[in-house]
Image (cartoon, grey):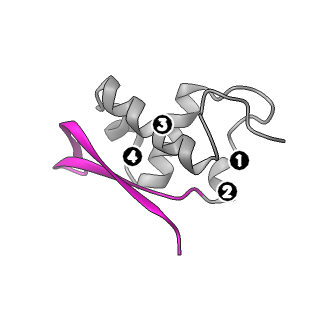
Amino acid sequence: MMEKISIPLSAPVYVHGESVSEIVLREPLAGDLRSLPVGRPFDMGLLLDLASAVSGWPPSAIDQLSVPDALKIVEALGGFLGGSTSETPPS
């Protein structure tokens, strides 16, 4: 069973026309990682795209997140990826 993480947001955002105060991230699948570079640090834009993929939220909803909330989400993604998202992934 895939792991899921629920992250409360400091400010609600609108997703598909509804106000939402938490985001649920599922564990990424291999296909979700296709756009991530191997051997280089992760780019914030790619990580936010990954957040969109694993939450089911459209990019327009991810773009509404506050910076602190976006950073919490990136940190959670790092946990799924086996470490910090600021480090180079193992090859």
Residue 24 on the magenta span: yes
Quick one: SS at disc 4?
loop
Residue type at tag 2? Gly
Disc 2 and disc 4: Cα gap in Å?
A: 17 Å
Q: Which comes before the other along the chain, label 2 or label 3?
A: 2
Q: Which residue corresponds to mark 1?
A: 34
Q: Which residue corresponds to mark 3?
A: 75
> Where in the figure is residue 15, as x and y percent of width and height?
25, 48
Residue 13 left/right relative to 49: left
Front label number (2 vs 4):
2
> Where in the figure is residue 21, as x and y percent of width and height?
19, 46
Residue 79 on the magenta span: no
- Quarter holding residue 41: top right
Disc 1 and disc 3: Cα gap in Å?
A: 19 Å
Front label number (1 vs 3):
3
> Where in the figure is residue 48, as x and y percent of width and height?
48, 35
Query: Which residue corresponds to the image point at 58% horizontal and 33% vertical from the top-left?
Result: 46
Q: In which quadrant of the rendered image does the C terminus lie?
A: top right
Front residue of this view, candidates 67 and 76: 76
* Residue 35 sits above or below residue 69 on the image: below
Disc 2 and disc 3: Cα gap in Å?
A: 20 Å
Tag on residue 58? Answer: 4
Disc 4 and disc 1: Cα gap in Å?
A: 18 Å
Residue type at tag 3? Glu
Mark 1 is surrounded, within 10 Å at the Cα level, by few (under 14), some (14 to 19) or many (20 or more) other residues, namely few
Query: Which residue corresponds to the image point at 67% horizontal and 56% vertical from the top-left?
Result: 31
Q: Which comes before the other along the chain, label 4 or label 3?
A: 4
Disc 1 and disc 2: Cα gap in Å?
A: 5 Å
